[in-house]
Amino acid sequence: MILSFILGWIVRGAVIIALIVLSTVFYYKINLPALSEMLDARAKGSVILLDKNKEIFAWRGEQFGEIAQASKISIHLKNAILAVEDKRFYRHFGISPRGIAGAIRINLNEGRGALTGHGGSTITQQTAKLLCLGIPYKASNWDSEAQYEGNCRQSSLWRKVKEALFAIALELEFTKDEILTLYLNRVFLGAGSRGFQAASQRYFNKSATSLNPAEAAMLAGLLVAPSRYAPTNNLEKSQNRANFILGLMEQQGFLSAKSAQYFRENPAKLSAKASQKAGGHFADWVMQSAPHFFTSKTTEDVTIETTFDTKIQQAAEDVLENIFREKVDPKSKAQAAIVIMSPNGAVRAMVGGRKLHVAGTFNRSTQALRQPGSAFKPLVYATALEQGYKPNDLIRDEAIKIEIPGSGTWTPQNYQKKFNGLVSLTNALSQSLNIPAVKLAQQIGLDKIGQISIDMGIYQKISTNPAIALGVSETTLLELTSAYATFLNDGIKVLPYGLKKLSLETGGTFSNKSLSSDTDRILRSETANNIVYMLEKAVLNGTGKKAEFSNWEIAGKTGTTQDARDAWFIGFTSEYIAGVWMGYDNNEPLIGVTGGGLPAEIWSLIMNKIHADIKPQPLPKNKRKLALFPNIIDTEYQPQIRQQGAGFIDKLLLTIFGEE
């Protein structure tokens, strides 16, 4: 009677448990959304960045490709996933008692708890976890998306029971291929890739329908630890993991021994675009310059067409790496930055530091505020020319003393520690003489120089000290390079830009209309062309000689700050403007480096590469028009030492033989 009583309660209990299980499964089943609504798990959208040829060069956010359907993906990918995750997938009803028993045995043998470590979960159970038991993410219900994802990844016994019941509901509602399709599109596979289609494009630049066994094994290998095994992080580790999976595919009859061995000897490799990783500092700059609701905070998939030129970027990176490898101490922590743009302001390449293939790091091209030194002087001379001065006007390079209120007496010096007497403005700029620049700045007005600088795109605070002429006010490489572009652009302001067109997957578009026009004229055409002429002399006969290359006309200016803390070369041809900066992040002085040295050499090597297939075109400069007797523009100064070159004969010789 006791036995009968116990058995009766056992039966009743079993019936009650069965009813609860059936009710729960039925509840899950009737509340399952349509398959199409569950494929994309992302709360935020992704951003694809295209270069000037409309080829992908960078990704941001969680990338989601086209729908990867189980019936259409590469058979090798399907087999690799089944081999590593669930070889009985097409034979069980959502849970696998054999798999669970095997996992418990392995855990116990390895000295862990029965439910700690290997879980024996089927693909259907993993899909249940990925679907968070059908609970969609709603920002209003959670403190953060991370909190929501943490809740979905719970591994308690009760959670596993619910996942098992949800898995059975999935099996009752969908076919095996539909469940596998959900799994294929929901899993995260590293480097911002959500789903196998996105990962295939991200790593191999091909569709998931055309993967070979080695590529399929590499992607399947990411399932266990996406970030750890991502080939963009550690290709060798990813290949080793793929080899293990190729072995499983061979054991389970998905691959012949010969094929498995062949693909072990010929492992998958990243595509050239994948090797570029995140697109570097240029991609970061474009993302930051566009509205955040279209980039970092977008809830839709966005495609951005940019001005980026991968060939120019590669040329810049190659030259920089070679220079630092061959001419810089390997222990040196000196940094460098490069910006290259077209005359209309379209930025073609950007290097923000020696670590090239990175994302989200400090960009020395756009964020580092540094003193430009003599690279600022063209703006001083442009201000003077706007007020009627001429390139061949004469100024005395002499010893001077300037009383600065609150700072005492300042006695500026030239870099060579000598005076040159009467020199033309062109020669003073080409030789980067400090004293003529300081005297000229005082004559034309420091406030006028500051206003011209702001108008030309240097938006940092401009000094009101006479030393403004020597580039003591800080700016960024991008700002200064775009200011030089104004000279090449006939005096019309150039606005640097990288974004051309932004398109939403839902159909909306936005085009960049902020290109310069004649209404943005900053300098008279004559002034701009005269500065181009003067800067050409700075390369031909002055401090920028190392920047020369091939048969191109070049204009540019060096810049070296006090104690060589910064070294610059900014210059242009008729086709491109480029700026190069070198220095230490902590303002430590450079050893043996000036703007006319390594920066000019880097500039020359890069420009030579990117102009190789372009027919040389002349610069838009004025021909030299010397007056018979050039004006001496600082007659109010009384020389403190005897100067040469102030007499009639000297002025006549300058007129006949030129400015040297």
Image (cartoon, rainbow, N blue to C red):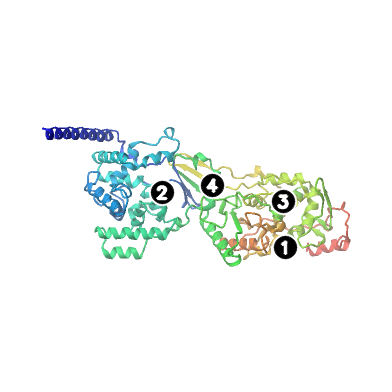
Report if residue 139 is visible in the image. yes
Residue 414 location (% of width, % of height): 78, 59
Q: Nearer the viewer, residue 623 or 137?
A: 137
- Badge 4 density bin: few <14, some 14–19, many ≥20, Cα 10 Å: some
Q: Which residue, given by chain and number where applicable, does mark 4 sit on?
A: 286
Q: Nearer the viewer, residue 412 or 329?
A: 329
Q: Secondary structure at mark 2?
A: loop
Mark 4: amino acid: Val
Residue 66 x/y as whole percent: 37, 46
Q: Amino acid at mark 1?
A: Gly
Tell me the residue at 57%/55% (across/down). Answer: 353
Q: Which mark is residue 193?
A: 2
Report which residue position mark 3 lands on: 472
68 is higher (above) or lower (below) than 610? above
Q: Local crowd at mark 1 within 10 Å, few (<14), some, or many (≥20)?
A: many
In the rendered view of the protein, which quadrant contains the C terminus? Answer: bottom right
Position of 123 compared to 42: left or right? left
Circle number at residue 542? 1
What amino acid does circle 2 point to?
Ser
